[in-house]
Image (tube, rainbow, N blue to C red):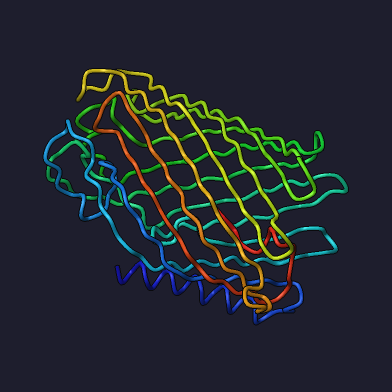
Amino acid sequence: MIRKTIITLAFIFLAATSVYSADFSNFSLKLSGGLAILSGGDNLSSNRSNAVIPNLYEKPKNRHSINPTLMFDMRYYDERRRNEYYFNPIRMMHGGVSGGVKHKYDKGSIDLSGFFNILDKQWENPYALNRSATPSANYGFDVKTSGLLADSLSLGYKVSFTSIDNDAIGNAYQSLKRDGASHKIHAGYKIKAADAVAITPSLSFERALYSGGANRFSGYGAELGANLRLDEGRMLMAKVSVSENVYDAVHPIFNKKREDTNYGASLMYIIFKPFGWEHWHATMGATHQRSVANIVFFDKEFTVALAALGYTFGKQRGQEDAITIR
């Protein structure tokens, strides 16, 4: 926990130092903090409280927690080259960070970013009843385009690599090896339903090519997002999604091929300049994710409620840029 806290504070310190050591007019630094209430369960979660499980044939136990949150988003705008450079967290408490550059054309833009998690852990053998964690690494890159091929059309490709230090279950069963890569493509189309309303349907396909055949899968997904500007100072953002993962080979522990159906929904309410405070924004929201598997061990469900207050230093952008959601 101390190590995670130190790295988190280091990220914030480096971001703030970078901003104040250069021409402030082309930088922005958004800091926000608040509280998150978490409830749910996942048998594969490597939290210490999840190390002991009663058996392999029950749904995961629900656990509840209240955690402080600290997020940042640092950006530099090179107006001459029409580039926007950014650095921000993906999963702060797991040491996940992302950095990249977005280049704008006369029509459309392209965004290239890289990401890595430096504090992730996985169970050495997730199917043991008393489990030990081992370090793991997750890293990759993401390419997204918007409006290049057609107005309102967005396309993306993401590749993610996973490497597990001591993959005990993979050493015991070749078909359960977890090292490998996942490739995902998606396409979305933004529809302006009204001046203050934007709706974005999207489709995705994922191919996970892990070393073990029972962990390889093909995933098909659909998502519908909507942004509603209530007035100059308030915005509502909603999203629903569904996806299906079909695995390649029979799982040797459960003697059947795994199939997962995943559902998600989120709602976020953003207030710009609350109480008339310049450069501030307040965020309240909730997200719910659920996976229903044909093998009950892999069922999982999470609900997160969040309230946060943020401040933007430096260059002010449009309202949609006031908060980064990943």
In the rendered picture of this protein, how many numbered marks are placed on residues?
Answer: 0
For this view, does 184 lie left or right of residue 63? right
Question: Is 222 rendered above or below residue 7?
Answer: above
For this view, does 46 lie left or right of residue 25? left
Residue 175 percent across, percent down from the top left: 29, 25
Question: Is 288 rendered above or below residue 247?
Answer: below
Q: Residue at x 44, y 28 (%)?
A: 209
Q: Give residue 169's quadrant in the image.
A: top left
Q: Which residue is drawn at 41% across and 22% down?
A: 246
Q: Which of 77 and 225 is in front in this view?
A: 225
Residue 182 percent across, percent down from the top left: 48, 34
Q: Give residue 91's quadrant in the image.
A: bottom left
Q: Nearer the viewer, residue 39 or 81?
A: 39
Q: Which residue lies furthest to the front in this view?
A: 230
Q: Nearer the viewer, residue 141 or 72?
A: 72
Q: Which residue is drawn at 23% across and 41% down?
A: 60
Q: Quadrant of the N terminus?
A: bottom left
